[in-house]
Amino acid sequence: MLNDQAFVRYNRQIRLPEIGETGQAALLNARVLLVGAGGLGSPAALYLAAAGVGNLVIADGDAVDSSNLQRQIIYRDVDQAKNKAQAAAAHLLELNPEIKVRVVASHLSDQRLSLEVSMADIVLDCSDNFATRYAVNAACLAHQKVLVSGAAIRWQGQLMSFDFRPSPAKSAQGPCYQCLFPAGQFDEPQNCSTSGIAGPVVGVIGTMQALETIKIITGAGQPAFGKLKQFDGLTMEWQSFMVPANPACPECSKENP
């Protein structure tokens, strides 16, 4: 049940017929894990907190640096040298004290990653390297969780969601992250410190991750499951590509248990 305070705070959102009271209650009961609190995680976390996602877990082992402030909009100048997850959690609770935010002040891997993924309803991969993305993908697949993955560099960004939940309505298993980017076939991409990044581009992708998450939790619209969305900040154009499951994928193929 939504109390009077929740009705007032989320009134504009509740007015959307695709969300309503039922959807807002689902948001308040949802558990979302954000892996990374940088350029992608910053806007994603802010919008999810503002929307009333009731339980957020923020995981990041890095400290805030002055070079982050150009695009990692959740932080302030006084946050320099603080752990990102801890600083982000403080700002999220200032924005919305009605939600719960739990901090993991380290990089998730191995058993801790598996545990955190198992406790979440939806996982947002806001990391910046292939190793973490592959690990998060594997954990979400193992625990049958929804994964919303984002990435951005220079003027380009990409977004894709993966639905690993069991469902009798599914005609076939969709793709996983390794179907899109097979391990060992791609060099580690250049990072923001060497290649540069337009701040609003990473903001666009992080915001879209939050929007996808809200849609998935509330059942609104059509999430981009199985579709790679690519954004070009120089032309302001989006491209969309269907990504089929790879029958030989070592991570998700039934031929490779």
Image: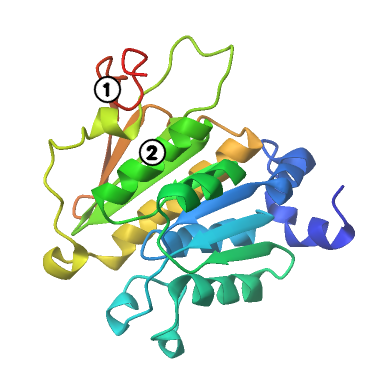
Where is residue 227 shown, x and y percent of the image?
A: 35, 29
Residue 38 in the image: above or below residue 81: above
Q: Is residue 68 left or right of residue 76?
A: left
Return the residue found at the far front.
Answer: 111
Where is residue 226 shown, x and y percent of the image?
A: 38, 26
Q: Is residue 5 left or right of residue 154?
A: right
**Among the 4 quarters of the image, the one containing residue 215:** top right
Seen at 48% across and 9% down, the residue is 171
**Residue 223 is at least partly visible in this image:** no
Return the residue found at the far top.
Answer: 171
Where is residue 63 shown, x and y percent of the image?
A: 38, 77
> What residue is pinned by disc 1?
249
Residue 144 in the image: above or below residue 99: above
Kind of residue at badge 2: Asn
Seen at 31% across and 41% down, the residue is 134
Q: Quadrant of the C terminus?
A: top left
Seen at 35% across and 44% down, the residue is 135
User: Are there few (<14), some (14-19), or many (20+) residues within 10 Å of tag 1?
Assistant: some
Nearer-the-camera pick, 83 or 159: 83
How many numbered marks are there? 2
Return the residue found at the far bottom.
Answer: 78
Q: Is residue 206 left or right of residue 4?
A: left
Nearer-the-camera pick, 131 or 159: 131
> What residue is pinned by disc 2?
137
**Among the 4 quarters of the image, the one containing residue 94:** bottom right
**Residue 139 is at least partly visible in this image:** yes
Element at badge 2? helix
**Distance Cα–Cα, label 1 vs label 2:** 13 Å
Element at badge 1? loop
Residue 78 in the image: above or below residue 48: below
Kind of residue at badge 1: Cys
